[in-house]
Image (spheres, rainbow, N blue to C red):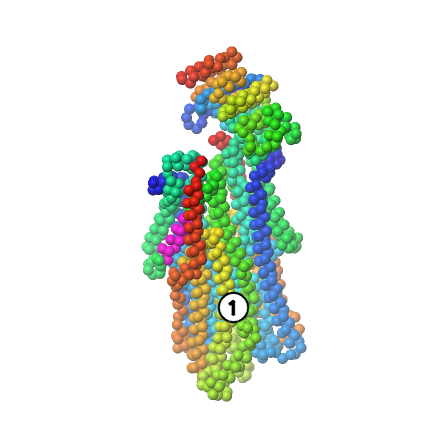
Amino acid sequence: MLEAINLSKIYDSGPPALDSLNLRVESGEIFCLLGANGAGKTTTINLFLNFVKPSGGSARVKNLDVVQAPLETKKYLAYIPEQVMLYRNLTGLENLEYFSSLAGRRYKYPDLLPFFEQVGLTTNEAHKRISTYSKGMRQKVGIAIALAKKAEVLLLDEPTSGLDPKASNEFSGLLQKLSSEGVAVFMATHDLFRAKETGTRVGIMKHGRLVDTLDTEGLQHTDLERIYLEHMHD
Amino acid sequence: MLTQIVKHEWRNLNADRTLWWIILILAVAISYGVYNGTSWVAFLEGTIEVALQEEHDRLAKAQHTVANGLDPERASRSPYSARYIGRRMGLRYAYLPPGPLASLSVGQSDLYPSYFLVNTQATQRQKRHSELENPNHLLESRFDLAFVTVYLFPLLILALTYNLISSEREQGTLAMVLSQPVSLRKFVVGKVGFRALMALTLVIGFSILAFLLNGVNLFGMGTTLKLLLWISIVIVYSAFWFGLALAVNTIGRSSATNAIILTSLWLVFVVLVPSVVNLLVKTLHPVPSRVEYIVAMRDASMNARAEEAQLLSIFYEDHPELLSEDEQSHTENFDTLQWAAEMKVEESMQPVLNRFNKQLAKQQTQVNRLRFLSPAIVTQEALNEIAGTGPTRFRHFMSIVDAFHEEWRTYFVPKIFALHEMTGPDFDEIPDYTYLEDPEDRIANRILVALVGMIIPTLGVFIVGFSRIRHYPLNG
Amino acid sequence: MIKTIAHKEFLQMVRDGRFKWVAGIVFCLLLASLVVGWRHYQTLNTQHELAQTRVREQWLSQPEQNPHSGAHYGTYAFKPKTFLSSIDTGIEPYVGAAVWLEAHNQNQFQARPAEDATAVERFGQLTAAVVLQILLPLLIILVSFSAFAGEREEGTLRQLVSLGIKPSHLAAGKALGIAAALALILVPAVVIGVITLSLLTNLAEAKVDSGRMLMMGFLYVLYFSIFISVSLAVSAKARSSRLALVILLGFWIFNGLIAPRFASDLSRSLYPGPSNFEFESNIKLALQYGVDGNTTYREVERKRRTEIMSQYGVNDIKDLPVNFAGIRLQMNEDWGYEVFDKFYGDLHENFRKQNRVQQIGAAVAPLLAIRSLSMGLAGTDYYLHQDFAEKAEMHRRLEVKIINDDITFNGAEAGSKYVNGIDVWEKVPPFQYQMKPVSWVLGNHWVSLLILIMWFGLAGGPLCWTIRSIKAG
């Protein structure tokens, strides 16, 4: 589904932000990328979104190179940043209608309401302006967009930072549901606990390099923390 | 896809209120501008009407006296005398009727005389009747539709577009949009296109509505072509500003910085470049001052007077009532002398006048070239031309006045020399003034040059904008 | 404390690339407009002085002829240029530079430069006054819109307030910093300007009135302070720096673009003037039938004729010991004076009323106040033009009177064949215009001055008030 082959990014000066990343995320998998600030997590996501151009290698979505087919690959991608930013003066429903139509999926308003229901937002809330939404609600709309555009890959950039534990938990639940329906999920996060709980695989990134990949199955939370800290101390 | 973006933009702007403020301001400014222009045209037309009425009454009275063989009120002011008719009583107004779209732009028409009372005297003695306007008012040209178009409309465009991309980035929605299968270029085309379409519909729609409400006949002779020219000028001029805003947006600075850059550019194009061009033209090709012209004219008439024999004639020319009975017989003599003296002045003034006009023409050529430095100058000039309130139509008017003056002299001067006594039917043969419009296509040509001159920089800013868009910094 | 803040503001501004650019451009424009303005002044002034001399020569070199012919030939009065017109050309492009002083008629001014100019003239000419009145306020806005709003957004304001700095000190410091940055542009431009001018010309000869210049400088400083206060107040009050910028730019556009036009439209519609046609026909009519419209000139003339005859105790005009032609010409002039005084007086009165409306308009746009004062001090305003027109008319009346008296008293014997030459031409003094003192200027523009001072006070007041209630967060 999602594949990075020798993917590298070097900004104008300085060390590589991303150094020959090789990675595959299959459908049904939830890959959580851990790492300190500036480790290259966001760069990786930006490369998959073609927001920045790779210095080497290629980022592929469904076997398509994102640089060569930027629009085609984005049809399958959904992006949920740390803050899902929407048009404040429009309602949740209007925002969803806009983004899904940009993705090439036309819906009538009533047909969009089930998506809100699926992410746990009421019809009433869907008709309210985004300016009244909390962060957790906006993140949910982000998922709703992914659902509406029938995304096959979900790219998340620290989507739960700043959410209270309950909202965070709900959000993870949604991700797992999506994944069980065959969506490949790629999430950058700081939250070791959440990564272990939600993810099927965990990657640790440092100075632009993927230094370790672990299966979460059978992995203890304390082990993960130890391994992570060891890598950080090197 | 584009329609989706456009629809969304409409929804977003609609929810934002900015749009409604802009529409309101535009509607008020345009109606006020057209109202102002229309009342100025009504004023000019009123003046011409009153003048023509006065002319008609005066001539009718003279003809009545002559046709019925009545005695004149005073012997020195006899309508029987071809001399008195041709020099005083029978004079006709040569006037410049406002063009069909004159209410569009007051232009220079508040500085130029709109009528001349043509007589047999030499050209330099034809009096200029400029309107009596408070000079403080002239300092600011009027709040007309051209002002709204040239000055205010760009500001409204900039208000709609200064944060075209930057606000999406600042809100964070840009990343959300671009994670969809839509290119930034297409997204921007949708945004700019929607705004441009809306702004143009509003400005053209409101203006035409205001014209109709003010009783301007839009389908009269030649009006339709002019209307089309005006619309194309407005379209290209606003396209320039949209392109500029787009190009500035692609630099990738914050909304506030964009606002500063765009306001400064507005200041540069609308205020600074024109005033610098004005200064430049005046410094490079200074027109010989009218003051020098006055002095030269006095020298010339002094020389003409130097011939002793004419002095008396000039004196009595001003005061025929002081002429004693026995001197009346000499009239023929001084009319000849008078004529000769004036011709001499006219002749000796010709080189001065030519130098004057040559320098003015040079200035105009220079302006014609330099105007392309700012679309605001091009637009203002083009709108003046379309409205017929610029220098071109005035020069054309002056040439018609000169021709009429010549016709008048050709008719009266021989009669004056022959001491002709007017008869009733003679009055019907007095030359009649008619204004013939400059052939349309000449205006059209000038406007087309102006259009091309604006399309090039407009394309330039769009090309810069669209080529930079690829490098738009999406994060940060 | 204030000094420290001002110093920091100043440094921050001067190091800002944007400021460097804009300030550089403003500086160049100011210097260029000063130099070109001065050149124009010099050319025009020389021209007018030469013309005035030449016209006098022409007058004196008239041949022996009936003196009344001389009065018809007349003279011209050319409006002298003031030195400060090189800074502010005021209404000069829109009023004539010369008026013909001839027998029988009070003429309107001729040779309006704008009539001969190209269409760009209406965009205005770049003068130092334009730079000071329009450009500098924009510069002030650009450097100060984020003074408080920006610091608030970056969180530095919170920090400053937590340090225990009084908001009023902060405001004073910021204002001083902005003022210092402005001085960085203005002072060198003025100094270079003055040095260049004094190298190029003899300042004493150019009749430079340093009092006027100082006064002008002071008023411009007042005008800039208003903009600094308004900008800081808006910056302190606005929710975000973007909003502050939008509000201030709106004010700048209103002040420089909308208000002046609107004021002149308003004054025109409140006090509409006559059309030129109406004006001229009214004068023509009144010259025949009197100002009241009931007296014909011929009756008056007849009455006067009998009076004169009885005064000298004769029964026939021909027996008078004086030349009746001269008396009659003067009588005609006196009759005309009444008419001209009435119609030109009404016109002038109407213009004054219109100007008053515009001056009051300064209450919403300080530009109107500074513009009117600046023109007044530069001697390029309507009032000076009007005064010049009156003085020229008085000179015309003197000239005609001298000539008519000559005809009356010296032409008794020769009658209508009377001629005279240089004797009578020399009796007419050359025309000279005496400039008006500053107090006279301020008398005409007191409304503007008052409003400008009120703006200064009012802009300072809310500034203090907003600053006191400033929110750090």
Extreme top residue here? A218
- Residue C365 in sight from this viewpoint: yes
Q: Position of residue C359 (x, y in %)?
A: 47, 57
Point 41% across, 45% down: residue:
C464
Compared across the picture, whether C3 is left or right of B22 comes to left
Instruction: Name the residue: 64% across, 31% down.
Output: A109
Q: Which residues are magenta?
A: C212-226
| x and y, in percent, of residue C90 in the image | 45, 57
Residue in the picture at 50% in, 37% down: B249
To which quarter of the image does residue B329 belong? bottom right
In the picture, which quadrant includes the N terminus of chain B? top right
Q: Amino acid at mark 1?
A: Phe
B435 horizontally vs B273: left or right: right
The reply to whether the magenta stretch includes residue C400 is: no
Q: Which residue is mark 1?
A: C343
Q: Is the magenta region chiefly helix, strand or loop?
A: helix
Q: Position of residue C301 (x, y in %)?
A: 52, 80
Residue A197 vertical placement versus B456 (above, below): above
* Residue B183, picture quadrant: top right
Identity of the residue drawn at 47% across and 85% down: C311
Image height of C174 relative to C89, above or below = above
Picture coordinates of residue B304, whole percent (x, y): 47, 72
Left or right of A100? Residue B139 is: left
